[in-house]
Image (cartoon, rainbow, N blue to C red):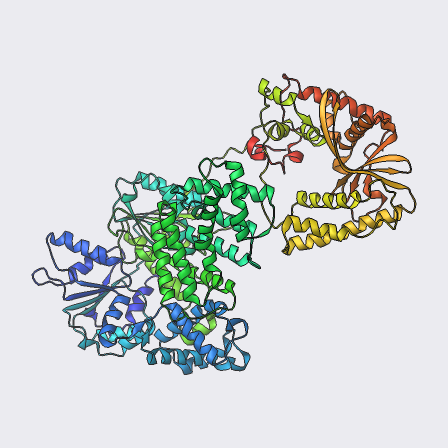
Amino acid sequence: MDMNQSKELIDKLDFLSERQKIILTSDQDLIESIVSVIDSENLNYSQNVVVFPGKRPSHYLRKTLAEKINTSFIPPRIFSIDEFINFIFKKLNDTNSIESIDAAGIIYEICIKNNSLTTFFQKFDNFFSIGLKLFNLFEELYIEGISVDKLKEVETLVEIPVNSRNSLRFLSQTYKEFYELLINRNLSTRSLRYRTVAEADLNSYLSFQKIIFAGFFAFTKTEKIILEKLSKIENFFLVFQDDDEALNTKIKFYSCPDTHGEIKVAGKIIKEFDSLDERTVIVLPDAENLFPLVRQGISYLDERSYNISMGYPLSRTPIYGFFITLFELLSSIENDMVYVPFYLKFMLHPYTKNIFFKNSAELSRIVFHEMEEFFKFEKPLLFIELKWIEKEVPSKIIQNIGESFLSAEEISEHIKFIHENAIKKFLSFSNIKEFVNACRELLIFIYDKSTAKYHPLFYPYVEAFLTEFEKLSNSLINKIKFEFKQSYFNFFKNYIASQNIPFEGIPLNGLQILGFLETRNIKFKKVIFLDLNEGVFPNLSEDYLLPYRIRKILGLPTYHDREKLIYYYFSTLIRGAEEVHIAYIKNDRYERSRFIEKLIWIIEKKEGAILEDNQSDLIHSVIYKVNLAGKMPDNIVKNHEMMDILKNFSFSATAIDEYLKCGLKFYYSYVLGIKKEKDISSDLDRCDIGIIVHEALKEYFKLRIGRVLNEKNLTNEIEKILDNIFLKQYGNKIRGRVYLLKLQTLDRLHEIIKYYQEISKIHKIEIISVEEFFEETFFDSRFTCRLDKVEKVNEKIFIVDYKITGKQDHLKIKFDRLSTEDRQSWAKYIGSFQIPLYVFLYSQKYKINPQNLEGYYFLLGRNVIDNDAFFNPLNEIEKGQGLSIISEIMKSLLAEIKNLEIPFQPTYDFKKNCKFCDYQAICGTFTVPS
């Protein structure tokens, strides 16, 4: 805003006499100035009324008076502007005040009566958010004195989701009926109370010696009417603080790479301060940074040495997350069956799994983590009944943990106890009140029966939620019933999203951590202001219902006016301080606030020089010193315990392949036995798809073992086989991505069968075995293998291994580049030992010359299933020579693995082999450059 524009604003209040205007400079203390204006009789200040924009300055005014008088006194009547209006309104009227949710309900009632809404918004849960927006709009229109006729002039330009037949007069008609209905029902809103007070004879209700309005910058039309009436009272004063151009404050700016940098800066600055009192403040425009500041930035401070006064979003609290987890579970229930991944997510939530079991949270955690293991590995179903869980799961848990301190019956009762109090309460509701009461009862249950009460800040969170539940339970909308259960959950999310938990604290206790509005009218000596970035501060997001052009036509405040208002209070805060530290994020996503640019421009004009980052004492860049040099993973030296494991180890083709690619991976996977934990999910990963395809082909060809394939016996029962597999794995309720993948898998299986039907016309194909498992000793080492399928084609035996991939590159053996003498060439040019190893083991078991065996990878992921889908890695060389080379290399590898002196070594190719490795975090290869 232009400098001295604040004086122009106060000059517009031409009904005030010069005597009634008290104008302060920006560096004067507003509170101390008020103390010098108010009068007392024998230390009784109660005949003085002081009105501020907000509540917080009242604490500082009382303290300043106490310090000045230094004895007992009766303080003045101190109000925020809303409190002052309510004080007068109660003398005029005994109507009941309503909450915004009540107002949204009344507006919905009017719209339904007038048939004004589209089909979607005729459901209250869909209407609720826009109902709140309409209420806020009506309140602004009403307090600004916008008439129904004035609104009619522009409402056709406003996009509202209404029924097209009634859209021309929807806004004005609803606006008119809303306030008429409020008056008829003896109800009031903030704007209605202001308008009522503005129409009253205030002189009759205010018998005070002095009335002082202080710290205001802008007024609504109704507020100006009230001020004009108050100006008729002789001892009415308006104390106004100018935002003159003088800037004598010591200011430092901090350019930070991210929020962590800002938090670090704040913590460092606070450490350097000699003392902390109520005149030192950290300002947080973004409430989401409150806990990073408290837990990381100033964690070294005693909690009693600072005060937090700001609103924090309820949607950011753990309790909100707990309810959302429950609602996910409840929304998934179909035919009394719960979706297992969501069920486990809820039961393993810290609040749920720590519900006391025989006075112990630890026992409860054991039970639910054992339940998780059961569902992951023994019963991997997606949908299951609660009754089945209560009846069957406890006995499975007991098998793992024993009956020394728990019985299956006790576990069953504990599970039922949680089901009854946390899940079954939410299976049906008659209306919003019943739903809200269920939420309240669950929250009290968690508070009473779990360790949640011991979590930091759980009690104030509970208080805030219970307050909101009470509002909803007693609201005018409490009897509204939704058609679907999910609608109650959506309503909960929409309502809680707009609510904050008020951290009110002790106003005059040590360091102050405040939201921006809480700093109004208070002169702080030391100010630390974080998050001065565009979009964060000032937050000038455009109004949803009334665009800029309409606001200008109606004479309503626009975002320009909001910016002026915010800058005024920002400016008076900065100019009134002795020392200011301003931090902002500077990176490719954020730019510093326009307010910083204004301050820097003022300083540059004063100093006559351009300020650059790190080239001035005013602007400091926060830079992290991070060493990005990767540390190569160390070799792992073998010991005798490892050798004992390897001595009895049963090798497989996969184990040999993994050792060749990376010795460390072999060590973590096979020696230590560390495996990636499997998640229960509705999504199928590549491994799941492979298992399903293998299982389906096994079941299909198992029926044809010992038979020569032909078109007649290659019948199409594969669909039934696949249905049974999915039923066993995922239950009878499959949907979404799982369902689509089932269809795709079935199509591919049909193609495979069709291929065999075609080639059976040309070749004699006999199925010898499927999923054949056996053990053999090879080079003095024990091997196990499982052959997907062995078939005889025209009297020659073929070993077939299914691969979900359609590519053969990672399976190739490049014999032309491979050297038995060059150890590094082995890992580079051998894709897999699998087919050659299977040939060796099968020939040894059945005493068949390897030359008479063929091995193929069946690439099921190819676009077309034809002869090219079969890949033999030994085709690139004369078979005997190729088997000889592989035999020599495999013998050397086995000797290497069993050699105590040769350590397990990292991969030769970090870029290729570490990108998707499960052990990155253990060995640190995600930091190692390729």
Furthest-bottom residue in this view = 149
Front residue (pair 923, 393): 393
Number of dots carrying numbers = 0
Furthest-top residue in this view = 901
Q: Position of residue 625 (x, y in %)?
A: 47, 35
Q: Quadrant of the N terminus?
A: bottom left
Among the 4 quarters of the image, the one containing residue 443:
bottom left
Q: Position of residue 448 (x, y in %)?
A: 36, 50
Tell me: 913 left or right of 844.
Answer: left
Q: Would residue 598 be visible to someone looking at this image? A: no
- The relative height of residue 316 versus residue 880 in the rendered view (above or below) is below
Q: Position of residue 683 (x, y in %)?
A: 62, 49
Q: Position of residue 145 (x, y in %)?
A: 35, 77
Question: Which residue is found at the position 38% from the left and 48% from the top?
Answer: 449
Tell me: 889 left or right of 619.
Answer: right
Front residue (pair 78, 841): 841
- The relative height of residue 505 versus residue 48 in the rendered view (above or below) is above
Q: Quadrant of the C terminus?
A: top right
Tell me: 192 left or right of 819.
Answer: left
Furthest-left residue in this view = 42
Among the 4 quarters of the image, the one containing residue 628:
top right
- The relative height of residue 759 versus residue 55 in the rendered view (above or below) is above
Q: Would residue 406 be visible to someone looking at this image? A: yes
Question: Which residue is found at the position 59% from the left and 17% from the top?
Answer: 640
Front residue (pair 545, 717): 717
Question: Which residue is found at the position 43% from the left and 63% from the top?
Answer: 435
